[in-house]
Image: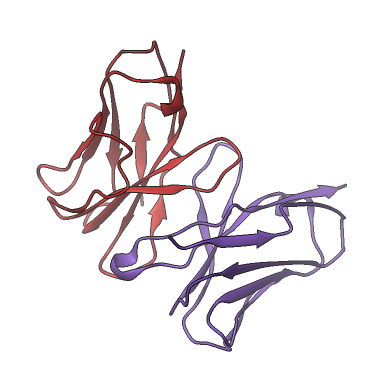
Amino acid sequence: GQQLNQSPQSMFIQEGEDVSMNCTSSSIFNTWLWYKQDPGEGPVLLIALYKAGELTSNGRLTAQFGITRKDSFLNISASIPSDVGIYFCAPPNAGNMLTFGGGTRLMVKP
Amino acid sequence: GAGVSQSPRYKVAKRGQDVALRCDPISGHVSLFWYQQALGQGPEFLTYFQNEAQLDKSGLPSDRFFAERPEGSVSTLKIQRTQQEDSAVYLCASGTAYNSPLHFGNGTRLTVT
């Protein structure tokens, strides 16, 4: 089956620092989605990428759809305490079924 | 507007009991998905409905798991004879159409003792 590897699995950062995380796959995808999950809540869509090579921003978040279509990157600039949570890459298969990576747990030191 | 609503938020069941988890999708949303999220892991697909039709149930772990959406809106995920390995958060998500972004509920945390 498809495998999604997210890196890093977890990270502590100082408030104000930039954060980078990535997701790689053994399969090609036509869409890449990034979700964030806060404790006790469901995942919330942050950014959607629809074209290989595409770079998309949403506030302090920037995501890129890799040229090979097998990877994607998410960057958060100037992190703040509310950025704490788990970030998932979740490219959809045919039929809109999402496959989630294992997540990157972000912890910010105040 | 209301989002995806799931109930109960928490459910504790003794091993062997049957449980029913409810999902109220966003009004008018055609597609509905159930996911299972074990502690410390990403959500995993269970089953998918388009209106009342269950189009994919390949992710259901065993025949103890059953899902329905009889009128194309509210959905129920039923787990019979619960086992400890069924302990997880069960997430429901809905979307407007094929390939539209999904909106997730806050999940039901099931603990089987």
Indicate left or right for B10 with B23 as reference: right
Return the x and y of residue B65 as percentages of the image width and height.
Answer: 26, 33
Q: Position of residue B110 (x, y in %)?
A: 43, 25
| Residue at 28% from the left image edge and 41% from the top image edge | B24
Q: Position of residue A66 (x, y in %)?
A: 60, 82
Position of B40 with respect to B71 (left or right) is right
**The chain coloured red in the image:** B
Query: In this rendering, does residue A16 appear at all?
Result: yes
Outermost residue toward the front in this view: A1
Which quarter of the picture shows residue B23? Answer: top left
Query: Front-most of A7 and B109?
Result: A7
Q: How is the image coloured?
A: by chain
| Quadrant of the snapshot with the N terminus of chain A | bottom left
Q: From this view, report whether residue A15 is shown above or below residue B66.
A: below
| Residue A59 makes an appearance in the image | no
Chain letter of the purple region: A
- In the image, residue B62 sits, relative to residue B100, either above or below, namely above
Image vertical order of residue B77 relative to residue A8, above or below:
above
Give the image location of residue A32, x and y in percent: 50, 73
Q: How many numbered circles does the render carry? A: 0
- The one nearer the camera, A25 or A61, is A25
Q: Residue at x 31, y 51 (%)?
A: B33
Residue visible at 55% across and 77% down?
A70
